[in-house]
Image (cartoon, rainbow, N blue to C red):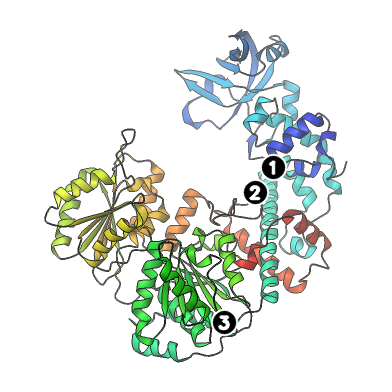
């Protein structure tokens, strides 16, 4: 039997089960079955006594030795079940089977000693186990030690396919591991002391002990991440070689005039470093693809503007694409306010731009008189064409689909340089995988004069003191955001709503003007309310999370987030970034119920302990998992990671990436490593090369 043998030929599977395994688990061949790893393991060496079953100290599953002293099939048809009482001499436990109860009853002999294995559950001081595994004593002896529990679907369980049955099929095919060729180069396995593949596949299914299991797990994690990094790096290097870019060799009049006349403050060391990195990229003759990470308020927009001015000085146009009309308008107002004095022609294009103005913009882009276009998805419409697009800034890239972003590339004969900006700090482990084909720049300093936002956790019982603090800030001429999780009151939920909140806040602070904004409002009304607050006409803005990005009001010094326990860390950090944009001390108040879970409390305590977005994002990753970081890419990664975790396996990712870089440096085409090339092709067959479009 070979790894590419159809699984229907494995003893006990057959055509019908093979079809089920293909549809439910994607297992088509013997090799696929070998790569279906246990999700966890149980120790089958210990035998418990029923009298010893106590509370929460028990493992997930236990073994008991004894006999069935009574059995009865209860109910009729699909609702029938087998209830059997099992005794080991120290006590009794109820065992229940809901599937094929009569067949199970016929198979059990009251005169035989069995070893049963399953998860005990206590209810009203009585213990029970649903669907335990049942073995004779001799069979149980053969199963001693660590045994894998295999992932299943409900459909497979309903068709009688259990973890134990999968284990039996894997036992049947384990001998073929001896003939499976190694897929990693000898210099890597030897240099890193990795377990050989054949031994790994045996150990992951049938580990002799925990040490062997740990070595097998590490090997498989490394292998997955190695091929993932190899794929990213191959595409990245291929793109760098194939896609020529504009050479921006000079710093010209626009840049110099802006730097000497319009710069709002001295650049931080981090901003200068990032601009230097970008300038170096733009002079190589290859297309730049760079990710710019920086916390809210760190000055990413100013860096983007300076880089766009370099592009203009070199005879090309620039474009900035933002995910929402509010954010695009904010960028337009900020950049126009900074650069209008030096004669840069900047235009805004969104879905609500009037037809006549659109015509002017289209004409200005084609004749080159428009230097910078800022907009939403409207900038990628087919009717939008540039004379010479040389530099593209994409803000909050994860909010755009890769196919949408690709449309910008068709608007230029030479691929434009690309700067991707995000205010959502991405942990290094994710940046090396999801954004592994991009060079990364980080702004890790705030502009001078900015004070860190003081974040406080307050409970409903402390609400009056929070309102007193808001009142003091308002009397000093400051402005306040109050964010609610819901728009309308919901009788099934105890969450605070914007509608209730607006009425209450308007009454409580009747000497001050209150604006409100939420996602169901028409764009014109939303903009009107936003403008009231931004201009200072309104003192308090009651809102939902639509203000998460795109609002810059330096006079706002307080952010109150109602039901903060219902928001994720990343979202809380983004909301906090709306304050602290001026020179005054700002506050973020997290309002929460007192009765919250341990994980929720830990999440809120992360917010109160740091304003560092990278620390927040690392904590968020550990609490939530990586999620769908890549926008429209369904899984976030081009292959499924069965063993490795982007959350916890940072050191393995770094080791795998270093190994992939070393291999490609010595053998770019993988011509001297046919086994590596074959495995890479097998894993990534049919995946789209999105690296060509960032």
Toward the viewer: 401 or 188? 401
Q: Dot 3 surroundings within 10 Å: few (below 14), some, or many (20 or more)?
A: many
Q: Which is nearer the eye, 50 or 562?
A: 562
Q: Which residue is at 39% across, 79% downward?
A: 268
Callout 1: helix, strand or loop? loop
Q: Mark 3 points at which residue?
A: 282
Q: Residue at x 80, y 58 (%)?
A: 678
Residue 412's image quarter? bottom right
Q: Do the residues labelled 2 and 1 touch (CB within 8 Å)?
A: yes
Instruction: Name the residue tied to disc 1.
Output: 37
The relative height of residue 210 versus residue 342 in the rendered view (above or below) is above
Closer to viewer: mark 2 or mark 3 = 3
Depth check: 459 or 139 in front? 459
Q: Is residue 610 found left or right of 505 in the rendered image?
A: right
Q: Which residue lies furthest to the right in this view?
A: 1
Q: Distance between the residues labelled 2 and 3?
A: 39 Å
CB atoms of marks 2 and 3 within 8 Å = no
Residue 130 at x, y percent in the picture: 58, 21
Q: Position of residue 74 (x, y in %)?
A: 59, 9
Task: Name the residue tied to disc 2.
Answer: 643
Discs 3, 1 touching: Cβ within 8 Å: no
Q: Marks 3 and 1, Cα distance to the nearest angstrom? A: 46 Å
């Amino acid at each position: 039997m070979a790894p590419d043998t159809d699984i229907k030929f494995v003893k006990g599977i057959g055509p019908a089960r093979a079809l089920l395994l293909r549809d439910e688990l994607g297992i088509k061949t013997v090799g696929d079955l070998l790569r279906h790893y246990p999700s966890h393991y149980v120790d089958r060496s210990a035998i418990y006594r029923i009298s010893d079953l106590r509370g929460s100290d028990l493992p997930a599953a236990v073994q008991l030795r004894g006999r069935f002293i009574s059995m009865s099939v209860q109910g009729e048809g699909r609702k029938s079940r087998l209830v059997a009482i099992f005794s080991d001499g120290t006590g009794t436990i109820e065992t229940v089977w809901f599937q094929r109860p009569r067949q199970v009853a016929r198979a059990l002999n009251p005169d035989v000693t069995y070893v049963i294995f399953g998860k005990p559950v206590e209810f009203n001081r009585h213990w029970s186990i649903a669907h335990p595994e049942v073995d004779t004593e001799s069979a149980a002896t053969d199963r001693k030690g660590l045994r894998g529990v295999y992932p299943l679907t409900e459909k497979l369980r309903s068709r009688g396919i259990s973890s134990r049955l999968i284990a039996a099929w894997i036992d049947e095919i384990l001998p073929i591991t001896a003939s499976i060729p190694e897929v990693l180069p000898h210099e890597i396995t030897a240099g890193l002391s990795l377990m050989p593949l054949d031994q790994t596949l045996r150990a992951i299914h049938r580990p002799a002990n925990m040490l062997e299991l740990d070595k097998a797990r590490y090997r498989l994690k490394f292998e997955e991440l190695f091929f993932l990094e190899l794929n990213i790096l191959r595409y990245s290097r291929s793109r760098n070689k194939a896609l020529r870019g504009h050479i921006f060799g000079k710093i010209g009049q626009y840049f110099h005039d802006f730097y000497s006349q319009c710069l709002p403050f001295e650049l931080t060391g981090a901003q200068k470093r990032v601009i230097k990195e970008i300038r170096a990229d733009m002079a190589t003759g290859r297309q730049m693809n760079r990710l710019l990470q920086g916390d809210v308020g760190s000055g990413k927009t100013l860096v983007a503007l300076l880089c766009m001015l370099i592009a203009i000085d070199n005879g090309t146009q620039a474009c900035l694409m933002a995910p929402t009309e509010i954010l695009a308008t904010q960028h337009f107002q900020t950049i126009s306010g900074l650069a209008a004095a030096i004669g840069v022609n900047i235009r805004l294009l969104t879905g609500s731009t009037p037809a006549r103005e659109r015509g002017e913009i289209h004409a200005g882009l084609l004749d080159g008189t428009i230097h910078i276009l800022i907009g939403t998805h409207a900038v990628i419409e087919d009717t939008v064409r540039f004379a010479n697009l040389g530099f593209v800034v994409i803000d909050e890239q994860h909010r755009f689909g890769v196919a949408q972003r690709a449309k910008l590339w068709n608007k230029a004969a030479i691929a434009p340089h690309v700067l991707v900006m995000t205010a959502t700090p991405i942990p290094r482990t994710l940046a090396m995988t999801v954004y592994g084909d991009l060079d990364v720049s980080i702004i890790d300093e705030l502009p001078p004069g900015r004070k860190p936002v003081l974040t406080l956790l307050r409970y409903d019982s402390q609400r009056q003191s929070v309102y007193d603090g808001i009142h003091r800030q308002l009397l000093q001429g400051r402005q306040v955001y109050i964010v609610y999780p819901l728009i309308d009151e919901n009788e099934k939920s105890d969450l605070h709503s914007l509608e209730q909140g607006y009425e209450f806040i308007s009454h409580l602070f009747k000497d001050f003007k209150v604006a409100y904004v939420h996602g169901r409002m028409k764009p014109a009304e939303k903009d009107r309310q936003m403008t009231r607050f931004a201009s200072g006409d309104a003192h308090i803005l009651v809102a939902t999370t639509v203000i998460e990005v795109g609002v810059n009001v330096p006079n706002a010094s307080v952010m109150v987030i109602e039901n903060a326990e219902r928001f994720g860390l990343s979202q809380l950090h983004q909301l906090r970034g709306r304050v602290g944009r001026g020179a005054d001390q700002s506050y973020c108040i997290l309002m929460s119920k007192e009765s919250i879970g341990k994980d929720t409390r830990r999440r809120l305590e992360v917010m109160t302990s740091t304003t560092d977005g990278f620390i927040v994002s690392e904590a968020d990753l550990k609490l939530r998992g990586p999620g769908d970081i890549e926008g429209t890419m369904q899984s976030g990664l081009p292959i499924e990671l069965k063993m490795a975790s982007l959350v916890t396996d940072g050191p393995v990712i770094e080791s795998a990436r270093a190994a992939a870089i070393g291999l490609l440096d010595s053998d770019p085409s993988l011509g001297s490593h046919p086994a590596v090339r074959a495995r890479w092709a097998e894993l990534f067959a049919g995946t789209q090369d999105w690296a060509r479009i960032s």
